Image (cartoon, rainbow, N blue to C red):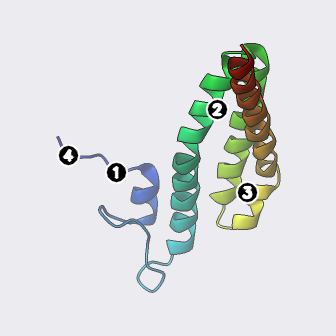
Amino acid sequence: MPERPSPHRCRYNVPYPTLYAIESKNKDAKLFNCVQRGHQNSLEIMPMYFILMILGGMKHPCFCAGLGLLYNITRFFYFKGYSTGDPMKRLTIGKYGFLGLLGLMICTISFGVSLIRG
């Protein structure tokens, strides 16, 4: 079954397998590339987020759930700001997502220390 292109690929006329649009060939290249970079950045951080959430949540489940919610909300605004075409708009609310990741790291370290002491 052929892959269905994403709405942004259709909107900005960027066919597969092109990863980034070329600005000399596409007037909407900057907008598409910002959407693509925001998506790619989210995918790069996801494995670390999931591991920290699982391990930290074994000792601090409610606290990690709150931190995960904080991270997901800020990540939404990070992507929305990035997809406007002005990469600096990703940092309005999106910059606070790292507080969620930092909290998850602390919970994971706490869990690891409790295992070592256990």
Using the image as rendered, state which of residue 60 and residue 99 is in the foreground. 60
The residue tagged 3 is 90
Label 1 vs 2, first from the N-terminus? 1
Which numbered mark, 2 or 4, is in the foreground of this view?
A: 2
The residue tagged 4 is 2
Which numbered mark, 3 or 1, is in the foreground of this view?
A: 3
Residue 75 versus residue 83 in the image, above or below? above
Which numbered mark, 4 or 3, is in the foreground of this view?
A: 3
Q: Measured from the top left, where is residue 41 in percent x and y?
A: 57, 54
Q: Secondary structure at mark 4?
A: loop
Horizontal relation, residue 18 to residue 110: left or right: left
User: How far apart in space, not on screen, are marks 2 and 4 (Cα)?
Assistant: 35 Å
Instruction: Please report the residue visible at 76 percent of the width from the left and 65 percent of the height from the top.
Output: 88
Instruction: Return the mark for residue 5.
Output: 1
Q: Measured from the top left, where is residue 24 in percent x and y?
A: 45, 86
Residue at far left of view: 1
Using the image as rendered, state which of residue 61 and residue 82 is in the foreground. 61
Quarter of the image that includes the N terminus: top left
The residue tagged 2 is 52
